[in-house]
Amino acid sequence: MALDYHALKDAPIADVEQRYDARDTILYALGIGIGEDPLDERLLRHVLEPGLVALPTFATVLGYPFMWIDAPRFGLDAARIVHAGHALRLHAPLPAAGVVRGVTRAVAVADKGPGRGALIVLERTLADAAGAPLATQTMTLMARGDGGFSAREGNGPPGGDTVSAPRPVAPEGPPDAVVELATLPQQALIYRLVADPNPLHADPRFARAAGFERPILHGLCGYGMVGRALMRAYLDDDSSRLLGLSLRFAAPVLPGDRLRIALWRDGATARFRASVPARADLVVLDQGEATLG
């Protein structure tokens, strides 16, 4: 079965109402490595009550219809879909506990051709129980097994939709800050408890069937760790001042990798890339840009 363009585009993929509590907020923070220094009082506010503060990147796992790609109506090769990029814009601080509503829809589906895959661009709006906006995010997926879908008559325009996402200009010169953060060998197993249960990140057999040597770390886990690096380098660990964050996932992070995050700041904008020194400085997160308050 081929990717069904109209099933993806003609209606919201899902509306999700989610109730979360302090335990979820804390588990997310632990999943992106908060608490590696249990004496760091600046960060303990994200894992201790009272006065618990939700991290801004927690929005990436709220109100999302996890595993929607398995629905037969979309005709997707779910095992071969990877997260290619993500952008988040915060409209208000996230409550440490509450009820949120997420509305997810596909805004573009581009056909890269047979054997080259397809790009699916999703937009998710997140609001609180009263309807006040909390965050807007754009998620780009690479459907590696779904190229050539538009050759089927009536399955969308030739080539699908045009996807033209401007990318930040690559930084020049040496970084003005570098933050190194270690991932844990078991980090994906922790992160999945509150975030994404996709077996690609936990089941070695599933990972091998998807073309990976071993389970890989969730892309959004690395994304949250970049948020931590920005907070440390520029914001005195004040999470309320991280207002937006976008990046491209360039290569998988493996649980246990140590990330080297290089940062360049220009006023309220910071650009960054993350690499793994132990793997020949492999760039894993690229074209990063953040908005700082």
Image: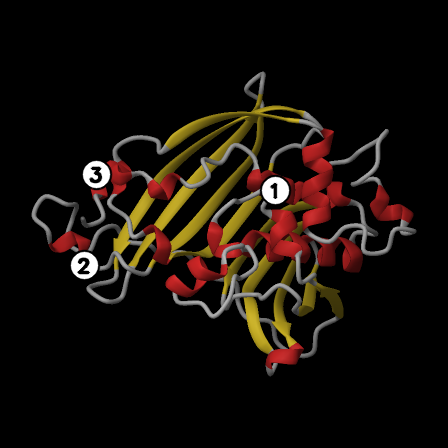
The residue carrying pointer 2 sits among few (fewer than 14), some (14 to 19) or many (20 or more) residues within 10 Å by Cα, namely many
Residue denoted by label 2 = 148
Q: In the image, what residue occupies the spot 64% across and 44% down?
A: 57
Mark 1 or 3, closer to the camera? 1
What residue occupies the far left of the structure in this picture? Answer: 153
Q: Nearer the viewer, residue 172 or 198?
A: 198
> Where does label 3 land, which residue?
6
Q: Position of residue 229 (x, y in %)?
A: 73, 59
Q: Amino acid at mark 1?
A: Leu
Compute the Cα span from label 1 to label 3. Answer: 32 Å
The disc labelled 3 sits on which kind of residue? His
Give coordinates of residue 66: x percent, y percent: 46, 39
Residue furthest to the bottom: 280
Residue plotted at (70% across, 61% down): 184
Is residue 112 among what the camera can see?
yes
**Relative to the observer, which residue lies in front, 20 or 122?**
20
Q: Residues within 10 Å of mark 1 (few under 14, many from 20)?
A: few
Q: Which residue is mark 1?
A: 193
Task: Tell me the SS state at disc 1.
Answer: loop
Q: Nearer the viewer, residue 201 or 262?
A: 201
- Numbered disc 3: secondary structure: helix
Question: Mark 3: few, some, or many residues within 10 Å (few <14, many ≥20)?
Answer: some
Mark 3 or mark 2: whose residue is earlier in sequence: 3
What numbered label is drawn on residue 276?
none
Q: Above or below — where is 261 with respect to 187?
A: below
Q: Which amino acid, by three-letter code, is at mark 2?
A: Gly
Q: Secondary structure at mark 2?
A: loop
Q: Residue at x 50, y 56 (%)?
A: 203
